[in-house]
Image (cartoon, rainbow, N blue to C red):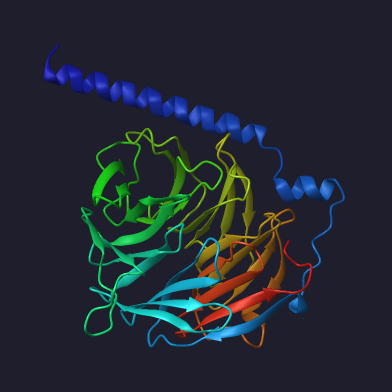
Amino acid sequence: MSVTELKECHSATTDTVNNLRDRLKQKRLSLLDTDISGYARSQGRTPVSFGPTDLVCCRTLQGHTGKVYSLDWTSERNQIVSASQDGRLIVWNALTRQKIHAIKLPCAWVMSCAFSPTGQSVACGGLDSVCSIFNLSSPTDKDGNVPVTRMLSGHKGYVSSCQYVPDEAAHLITGSGDQTCVLWDVTTGLKTSVFGGEFQSGHAADVLSISINGSNSRMFASGSCDATARLWDTRVASRAVRTFHGHEGDVNAIKFFPDGNRFGTGSEDGTCRLFDIRTGHQLQVYYQQHGDDIPPVTSIAFSISGRLLFAGYANGDCYVWDTLLAKVVLNIGSLQDSHEGRISCLGLSADGSALCTGGWDTNLKIWAFGGHRRT
């Protein structure tokens, strides 16, 4: 068979596969006769009762001199790490506001940070295309800075996101502007697996966000500028398990639902969406009409039960969504103690008792749930 014949055969096969994929998509859509909120309302469910007195700003963490881009809680202790445009990581005691560490970074253009499962190390990545690891127990240098323990080099674009594999301080996953995700061995500094890139099932644009499944750490999801989310199995790097469509803009944020069977996304198109990883179906769209201007979603997090979805927006809003009825029950951005301007990141403490938000006003704010409110 000649090269020309092979190309024609390949083209015909590709058309057939795409046609079958479209038919399968249409069949799935025909079976989706409702969404979560529609079904919940048909069963007489009512929105969760949640108001301004149920979430109170108890602390403001001040110390950064530039926009806060990322934050993460420790898995057990009440500590937060934040990354800022001022070129520093700050590790905070969330109870006392005390700065435990202020780490000067090799590259000021940091985009993401994460605690290791033990809380002994922090990682960060940014426009230098490197993920830097800092051991917080290392002796400081003569200037009082915590030295870089290891630099994970290999991406060909900026590092947009990083997260340690739960219960595995030796492994970490990064997402990058080079359209790939990488699983790293932190001990050796070497790549274990690369997800995407030359593989056809990989993202077609920058990876902006990742989330590892807390119920099955072999699975993780990624969001991209190609307006899709993809599900990956770390044991099979060559192909995405599923691709999830629906957004009409960059997928800026992604987070697994507490049960591990679903994940949420937040997008430049102003919507949050909930997807089922078993069926590949979109279960719900969370969208609040804002008039002509549609503020992008910058970050998301779920409550411990999954009944609430916290979503930060570029205009300073921070909606608390009832995930069951797709209804906004509170706008944290409208409260007196909220941020001035864009809310760029947020995260829930491990025990679900507090929410931390970070903004372009250089501050972090800790919001405590009143009494029984760990919904």
Can residue 174 be seen in the rendering of this structure? Answer: yes
Q: Is residue 228 something one can see in this rendering?
A: no
- Whether 130 is drawn above or below 194: the answer is below
Rendered location of residue 347, percent (x, y): 54, 66
- In the image, taking residue 153 as reference, residue 217 lies left or right, namely right
- Image coordinates of residue 330 in percent, x first then y, are 71, 72
| Quarter of the rendering occupied by the N terminus | top left
Q: Residue at x 54, y 67 (%)?
A: 77
Residue 130 location, x and y as percent? 24, 61
Please state which of residues 249 and 277 is positioned toward the viewer in this rendering.
Answer: 277
**Whether residue 235 is situated above or below residue 250 in the rendered picture:** above
Whether residue 129 sits left or right of residue 323 in the image: it is left
Q: Is residue 156 left or right of residue 261?
A: left
Classify residue 277 by image quadrant.
top right
Question: For the point 30% across and 48% down, which residue is it?
Answer: 185
Q: How many marks?
A: 0
From the top left corner, tell me how far across and down residue 206 is, in percent.
32, 55
Q: Is residue 224 above or below residue 74?
A: above
Query: Which residue appears at 64% of the width and 66% of the height?
Result: 288
> Which residue occupies the foreground of this view, 103 or 254?
103
Q: Residue furthest left?
A: 2
Location of residue 85 (image quadrant): bottom left
Q: Quadrant of the C terminus?
A: bottom right
The structure residue drawn at horizontal position 12% and vertical position 15%, both measured from the top left corner, is: 2
